[in-house]
Image (cartoon, helix red, strand yellow):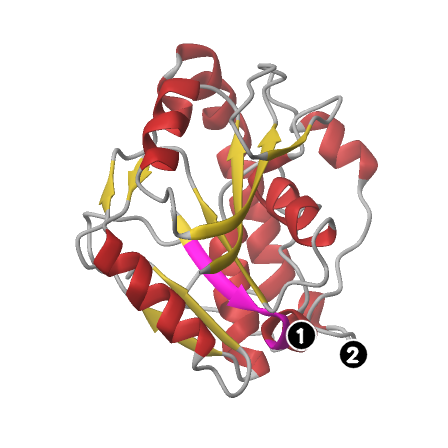
Amino acid sequence: MIPVLIVPVLNHWDLARRMLSTVEGSVERVVIVDNGQIGMRHPGAEHIRPILNLGFSGGINAGISQTPEAPWWMWASIDVTFTLRDLDIIENTMDGARGPRLITGDRSDERLLRFAYAALNRECVEAVGLLDEWGFYPAYYDDDDYQYRCQQGGVEWISHNGQITHQRSATISATAFATANARTFPMNAARYMAKWGGSPGAESFTRPYNRPVPLDYTPIDITGRARRVWK
């Protein structure tokens, strides 16, 4: 069984229901992060209801922080669907880990975006920390950041797409969110450059901001966060 499945939801509760129907019976605990203040409920799920959208990474971090006893966690976007075989592969991959490990979609396969789903164990969190919800709020470049940190921190990174399907970017298909993302995406791109000294794949720093700090270091930028709220 998958110990914990974290589901950040901003809109499209219909897609979330569809995704959840494909994992039924394979998950011990479902934690839904209601980032859109939709007020949805799902039978047997636990719900986190923030005042303001926590962002994709912030929602995942909240789900992990609320279930700290789990040996590993999985998250899923609302716009993916799973097969039982894929869930078995994910479970066996994580249960068989002997060190820090993460499994997610292969970034070279256009069928499934990396981080549309992922699973990581507590050894991974101990090695490189949680996702950077301050640096890359509310979404995008957080996946590049985490992969680069995992690379620097010796985390075993496993790619698996299998028969998982993905209705790409359904969350930002709404006009308001698409407009907001067009504004914040370049902001996060610039923040990535500042943090790692280059764009994804062309980084020049091995520590955040080229400082002698841990891999999970991120400055608390409350003004920057306010500027990047999706309204």
Q: Position of residue 159 (x, y in %)?
A: 31, 68
Q: Which quadrant would residue 208 be assigned to in this image?
A: bottom right
Q: Give the answer, above or below, for where 147 lies relative to 24.
A: below
| Residue 217 disc label | none
Does the magenta portion include 120? yes
The image quadrant where one finds the N terminus is: bottom left
**Segment tinted magenta in the rendering:** 118-123
Q: Amino acid at mark 2?
A: Pro
Q: Position of residue 206 (x, y in %)?
A: 61, 78
Q: Position of residue 230 (x, y in %)?
A: 59, 21
| Residue 207 disc label | 1
* In the foreground, 155 or 214: 155
Q: Amino acid at mark 1?
A: Arg
Who's the residue at 61% across and 26% down the image? 35
Q: Give the answer, above or below, for where 8 lies relative to 158.
A: above
Mark 1 crowdedness (10 Å alpha carbons): few <14, some 14-19, many ≥20: some
- Asked if the residues shown at circle 1 and circle 2 are in contact, with their CB atoms under 8 angstroms apart, the answer is yes
The image quadrant where one finds the C terminus is: top right
Q: Give the answer, above or below, for where 149 lies relative to 116.
A: below
